[in-house]
Amino acid sequence: MPPARKAMELLSRILLSPLRFGRRIGRYLRATQHLSVWPGHWKADLVSWLRQSSPETYARLLEDNLLERHLLRLLELARQRYGQLRQEGVSWRQSRRQVEQELASAIGTVSLSPPPTPLHLPPVQQVSENLTDWLPELEAALRSAAPEGYAEAKRRGILQPHLENVLHWAWEQWRDWSPSERANPDRRRLLLEQARERAVQIDWQTSPLHHDPACWQEDIVRYLRWTSPERTAALEANGELRCRAGRIASQLRQVWQNYAGAESRLEDWQAFARAALVWAKHPWHDLAGTNRFRSLTVDIVGSCNARCPFCPRVAMPAERAKGFMDFDLFRRILDRGRASGITTLYLYSTGEPTLHPRFYDFVALAKDLGYMVVCSTNGSMMHQHRSGLMLADVVQVSIEGWDRVSYERYRYPLRFDRVYGNVREYAACRPAGQRYVLNCLLTRKTDVEQYALLWGEFFDEISFHPMYPTAGVLEGRHRAVPEPSLAEDYWWFESAILPTCSDPFEKLTIAFDGKRVLCCQDFSASLELGHADDDWDQLYHNSILARVRRELLGQTFDTCAGCGNLVELPTAVKAAFLAEIDRVWKTHAIRARPKTFALEIPVTDPLVNRWLQRIATCAFAMESFAVNDALGSCASGDVGASATLLDSGTAAKHPGRSLPVLSAEMAVGKSSSSQKADADALRLWQGGTTIGSPAATKPRVLVIVGEVAEFTALAHLARRLMQQGEWQPVIYFTEPYPQLTKHVLRCRQWQLPVWAGPRVVEACAQPFLFDNTAPESAEPTPLSTDQQSLLDWCRSLAVPELERHLQLLRREQAFFRRVLEQLQPAVLILGEENVSKYTPIYSRTGQEYGVASVIVPWCLASREVFEQALSAIALYDATTSVAQRFCQRFPQWRLAGQRPLLRAPVYEAAALEILGCAPPEPWAFQSGFASALAVESPWMLRHYQQQGVPQSWLYLTGSWCDDDLHAGLAYWRQKREQLGRELHFDSQRPLLLAALPSNQMSNRRHHTDYASYPEILNHWADTLAGLEDCQTMLVAHPSTSPGLLRQLERVNVRYCDRPTFELIPLADALVACVSSIIRWALACGLPVVDYDLYRFRYSYFRSEPDVITVETRTEFEQALRNLAARLCPGRHVPATGVRMSEWGWLDGQSTQRITELLCRLAQAHTAQPQAA
């Protein structure tokens, strides 16, 4: 090319490049939807953005006439956020970019804004005496006050049912009126106004069922379309949808007619309607209409190269443990399957398919015949059969371990390195379009986070299922036979709500020798179900299969009772695992998507449960199936009446019975003495000796917990002891409290065994969470002659509540004796010796059995605190006649002063004296029967000495949280930066930690400047938000709901749910209210503002130079401003990370010193129980 032409082409490229660049930028802006530079144009931008990104939402808003409201709401949020960012000093470009990101997630979401308060509705002129005429008024009120909610309720099909429920409520009020009240127009107008106020508050759990039974078929169709669109479309395509809805509606009408009175309550109707929704979606209807096999499961190998302890193969008879399927038999099975319309093949059941030498030929034949092939493997042979696996549509790999040790325990004798390499190599070469799935059996020990991080990058999906105990044949029936070595891995299950199993209805399972088996749990092939070469219609109509189907539909389970399809995890356990999985996936962005057990409609309301059982019982009675006929061969809408579903004996005794999974009688039989080993295994699984056998090498320490704040301290110490590996801690809950279930689940996550006292088990709605599932019967020790004499004397005083309280304490003591005998702990750990919490019962009983007790304090207290707290309670008044006579004999219970006080009510003190569990000096601090007290610091040592604690009790060890304080100081910079990313804070700016006060308004209202507890919290939040140069973390008192603190967040004030002892060393100052955590702040060298808003005026910290104590609002605000002006991030952090002071020994050795104290006490006491 001539040089001149080259120069011209180069010049044209240079001149045209800006134009091309501008076009690219324009295309990018149109694709990413940016806001205009000028905020005045944002509304038009939002309209264009919404129309392009969410056309369905845009059309819906136009249809509902809500587009303008939606845009104005978004516009107001965007302008407020933009202005807020600009005030914080963020540049206009970054502010606009952040507003765009927030709008992108909110623009397609229609906010259901709550109705205004108070409501401003037009007055009602005339009120009809006919309540049905009120519906238009109620609808108009809802449309006017909450238009978004009105449109959404109409779309969901619950608008009319919601208004009918409101009318039902009004009718219940009307029903109780006299004729004169009904004729009073003012009374009717007031009722209508109340009904309109209820109408605008939509209950989104409202069932779409109208009150008119004639509408129920259409309601069910609408509900199924809304909740299960794909399934509903398939039913509609087959012409089954309306038939099914009609059959369900007929069953519901029959139930409502049988059980609902003419004057049914709204509560009954709402429970019935909720139960009706559960029943409408229940798979029972699919199974009742099934008349052929829909999938094929073929076990081409009758053996496995693993001996997993949870697998049914562990109990498989030796004669069925080996064998390979003949290829010609496999061809015949597949040909028969295609002729029967089956298109899905599962190439596994109880064996490992990749052990077959012709594995590739089997998969290739299935694909040639047009099957969708699903292959499951343990991963050990994937390197040898990679070509065969690549032909399958779905490859599933079953793995339970999250590291080498756990994997080789669950998948013995397979090797972790081989399986990990196979999984990784196959992920790199698998064909496009193939689903690569990981199956995980969740146990109580599974580390979900480590599991996801280890395996998640290789797979498309991770499917989680709880580990169920395997099934065995006992007395000719399938029953749960747990493996003893997995006693601490199994979950505790409860009977499912109307459990079902689809295998006998839809799945044809064939073993390697051609025998038709029930499912993978039928490992012995004990049921004579036929052979693959038999006629397949006869296989389906086999009399045994028909009986099994009848039992499953009738909820009797006489043949099958050990299958995991019949039980489920408790809702609380499910929710905890789902929350953990959600956290892990959000935190680490795991590649594989999780597939978990669903929390569809948790049926926890007993009234809903009762209605559901009634519906099921009625449905079972209305349907009929012959023994040897195809179940459901009639049309979906037909209701036969030629035979009964249940035999008369079973139906009369157990209508709609569910499986009592944790019943030893159901599992092993009442009269079977030959199954003693299995019975022992079941008891082991139930928790009788779950903590460990007598041969366990680690000594146990029993940690006694009685309240929420005590759990934080002692459970953390228990984790520390368990991590050191020298002790096996066991948590023992003695008192029920609101956060108990959450704490038990947390112990489960930490793998801490959990036991509970009788009051806890009886009060807890989920006692199966504990290792001792029910309080065993323990007879109280008979009273001695002296005890009986003292009891008679106390009776002469006419002490109220004495008999009941004495019986409670005797039962508690007898039960605790049984616990000590079963667990045989070496040491007891208590948080305090407090007669109000009966802790002397435990330390005294431990002393009887030669078990030492050590107090690990979790709070700062004194006689001054007790005296101030008890002075306002009448039960502690020592001037009553009964109290005076009691104190003449037991003067140690009385505290002289301006108002003489008792340390405990007379009935508590008398009961403890009778049982010999009364402390020698009730008013002395930590007085009781403990052997030692673990002292937190030199300052606390002096404090205990001043309180009269014997010197021989005191051992200076450091606090239970000192090691965490030390770690926070030693790794301050890294932890501070991580915390800043978590809270969206600048780690270089001063950081305050605000420990909000507890609610003491019930007994200290007249001592404070506030009218209510919310006013206190809001004042704290507003005052802290005013410190513009500082950032603040809010932490809740253990008794305060975290949800309340979320409402207090501001731009520079954030709620943090981390433990307080982890946050204190990362902060630069502490703001608290007469809290014992001030000790930790002083140990870390932090300045403190102590706001004594309740005017307790304790003297603990008033002489400390680093603590500023204030009592009024003005002083509090001024102290915070002064504190913020002199803060410097990280000033308190020592260069070595070690800080030794009179407030704490932060050297990282406190847990070790506590461990040495436990060993010393255990060696000094001989655990030989005295004769009871």
Image (cartoon, rainbow, N blue to C red):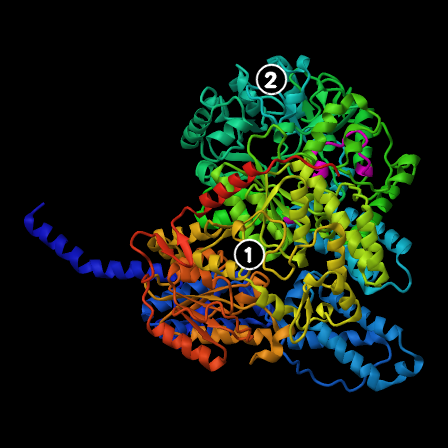
What secondary structure is marked by label 1? loop
Marker disc for residue 541: none
For the N terminus, which image quadrant? top left
The picture places residue 998, in percent across and down from the top left corner, at: 57, 67
Residue 748, located in which quarter of the rendered image?
A: top right
Disc 1 target residue = 949
Residue nearest the observer in this picture, 377 or 1051: 1051
Q: Is residue 1154 left or right of residue 545?
A: left
How far apart are the alpha carbons under marks 2 and 1? 68 Å
Q: Residue furthest left?
A: 3
Disc 2 target residue = 303
- Residue 447 seen in the current view: no
For the C terminus, which image quadrant? top right
On screen, 1117 above or below 739?
below
On screen, 411 above or below 587?
above
Instruction: Tell which tag, 2 or 1, sits nearer the viewer.
Output: 1
**Extent of the magenta region:** 553-572
